DNA sequence: ATTTGTCAACGAACTGGTTCGTACTTTTTT
DNA sequence: AAAAAAGTACGAACCAGTTCGTTGACAAAT
């Protein structure tokens, strides 16, 4: 029994991406990473991460003075959750039409097309 | 020169979906349709649609007493816009990985798989 | 020992979106 | 003609998310 992934807000997602990338990190670490792109205060990141603990999006090891945070849910289920949400809001719940739109709007290179083809083949095989 | 689609909020998107479906409609029409699902006040819908005029999401014909609203942008570009946003926020900008995730998380039926295959083939042909 | 730096905690302000009550106008009905 | 219904406009409240300043604890450097 896996608990459903919690839908992160935009800011929270940005932090999760860093945590998925770096593994367990302090606020300082995350802030440093995030500051490369946009420029935001240290306490902003801290506050967000504290909220995320409450929501269960991250876990926190408080044994050291600088707490160490870790993503509580994987990247894949979170992506799936966001995708499902968009699917419901804008594609009448149809994953296929979402995929079609994504495909026909975005210039994918041959390697990516091949990867998609492979997944498609696998799905067809399973569904038999 | 086409102006970029404007990113609608959730409430706005719900209204756009009705307009795409029904074509030009009055607030009453939209409200009736929307009320089937969730239950919201008439003036709530009205206010939202007024805001949407300001934002350029819909156009309004005021010649009759009941103003008639129409979606200002198509469904496809709007979907593409939302997809791009999610792609940037959660898939490091990669459309391919978004598609892969959508495919492997959602049970598509054979007909849908075929449609996706067709689009894939078309893309490969174009890209040559 | 004092100063300086690092950290967590928290409250306050601000933003965008949503919701609805109320006021006012124009029709339609009686 | 008066009352009721249908419509727009608008302000106010509210909510979630974001941003940051300030405070106080603790540790490190001088």
Image (cartoon, coloured by chain):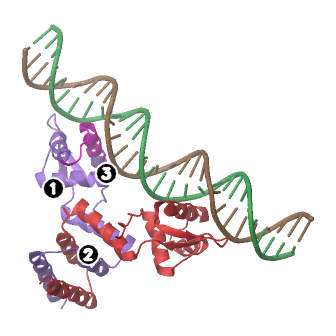
Chain colours: A purple, B red, C green, D brown
Is B104 left, or right, of C9 in this rendering?
Answer: left
Residue A55 disc label: 3
A94 relative to C23, above or below: below
**Spatial distance from mark 2 to mark 1, Cα to Cα?**
28 Å
* Labels 3 and 1 share a subunit: yes
- Dot placed on the residue nearer the N-terminal end, 2 or 1: 1
Magenta stretch encompasses residue B52: no
Residue, x 42% and y 72% (percent of image)?
B73
Q: Nearer the viewer, residue B76 or A8?
A: B76
Find residue A20 and name its label: 1
The subunit carrying tag 1 is A
Magenta span of residues: A37-51
- Farthest residue, direction front: B1
Label 3 residue SS: helix
Instruction: Tell me, for residue A105, which label it has, or none.
Output: 2
With respect to residue B39, does A15 lie above or below?
above
Please check whether the numbered discs 3 and 2 fall on a single chain.
Answer: yes
Q: Quadrant of residue D27?
A: top left
Q: What secondary structure prevails in the magenta region?
A: helix
The percent coordinates of residue A65 (x first, y second) are 16, 33
Spatial CA span between label 3 and label 2:
35 Å
Q: Residue at x 52, y 62 (%)?
A: B48
Give me the chain letter of mark 3.
A
């Amino acid at each position: 029994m896996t608990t459903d992934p919690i839908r992160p807000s935009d800011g929270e997602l940005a932090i999760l991406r860093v945590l998925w990338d770096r593994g367990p990190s302090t606020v300082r670490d995350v802030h440093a990473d995030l500051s490369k792109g946009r420029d935001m205060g240290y306490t902003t990141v801290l506050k967000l991460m504290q909220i995320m603990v409450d929501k269960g999006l991250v876990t926190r090891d408080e044994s050291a003075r600088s707490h160490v945070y870790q993503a509580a849910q994987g990247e894949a289920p979170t992506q799936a959750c966001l995708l499902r949400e968009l699917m419901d809001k804008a594609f009448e719940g149809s994953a296929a039409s979402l995929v079609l739109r994504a495909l026909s709007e975005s210039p994918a290179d041959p390697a990516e097309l091949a990867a998609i083809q492979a997944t498609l083949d696998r799905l067809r095989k399973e569904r038999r």
